[in-house]
Image (spheres, grey):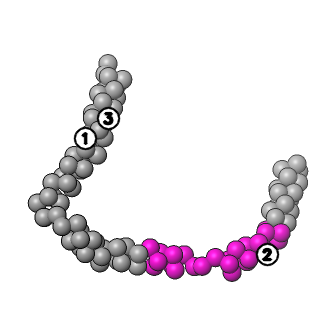
C-alpha cells in the first residue's frame, strides 16, 4: 500500500516536472541550431584548414626535410614522457599483482 502511494507521488512529481519543463525545452530547441549543423560546421572548418595548410607551410620557406625533422622532433618530445609513464604504470601494476 505504501509502495503504491510512493509510486503515485513520484509519477505525479515526474508529470508536473515534465509539464513545467516542456516550454523551456521548446525554447531551447527553437533557439539552438540542429546538431547536424554543428557537425557540418566542424567538418567544413577542418576542410578549410586542410586546404590551406600547404600554402601556410610553403610561406615558411622551409624545405620538406626541415619540416620532417621538426615533426619528428615534436612527436618524439611529446610521446616519450607518455611512454615512460606507461612503463612505470605497468611496473607498478605488476608489483601489485605479483604474489
Q: Which residues are magenta?
A: 18-42
Disc 2 designates what residue? 23
Does 24 lie within the magenta span?
Answer: yes
Q: Which one is nearer the viewer's eye here, 32 or 75?
A: 75
Q: Which label's residue is closer to the chain start, 1 or 3? A: 1
Q: Nearer the viewer, residue 39 or 76?
A: 76
Q: Position of residue 67 (x, y in %)?
A: 17, 60
Residue 75, compared with residue 8, is above or below; it is: above
Q: For marks 2 and 3, give the CA distance.
A: 50 Å
Residue 29 is left or right of residue 90, and the answer is right
> SS class of the residue under badge 3?
helix
The residue that disc 1 covers is 80
Q: Which mark is residue 33?
A: none
Image quadrant assignment for residue 27: bottom right
Circle 2 or circle 3, nearest the eye: 3
Say if the magenta span includes residue 92: no
Crowding near the residue tagged with mark 3, few <14, some 14–19, many ≥20 C-alpha atoms within 10 Å = few
Amino acid at each position: 500500500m505504501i509502495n503504491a502511494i510512493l509510486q503515485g507521488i513520484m509519477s505525479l512529481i515526474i508529470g508536473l516536472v515534465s509539464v513545467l519543463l516542456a516550454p523551456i525545452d521548446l525554447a531551447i530547441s527553437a533557439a539552438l541550431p540542429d546538431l547536424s549543423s554543428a557537425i557540418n560546421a566542424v567538418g567544413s572548418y577542418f576542410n578549410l584548414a586542410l586546404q590551406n595548410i600547404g600554402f601556410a607551410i610553403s610561406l615558411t620557406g622551409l624545405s620538406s626535410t626541415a619540416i620532417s625533422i621538426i615533426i619528428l622532433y615534436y612527436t618524439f618530445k611529446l610521446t616519450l614522457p607518455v611512454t615512460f609513464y606507461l612503463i612505470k604504470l605497468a611496473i607498478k601494476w605488476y608489483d601489485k599483482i605479483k604474489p
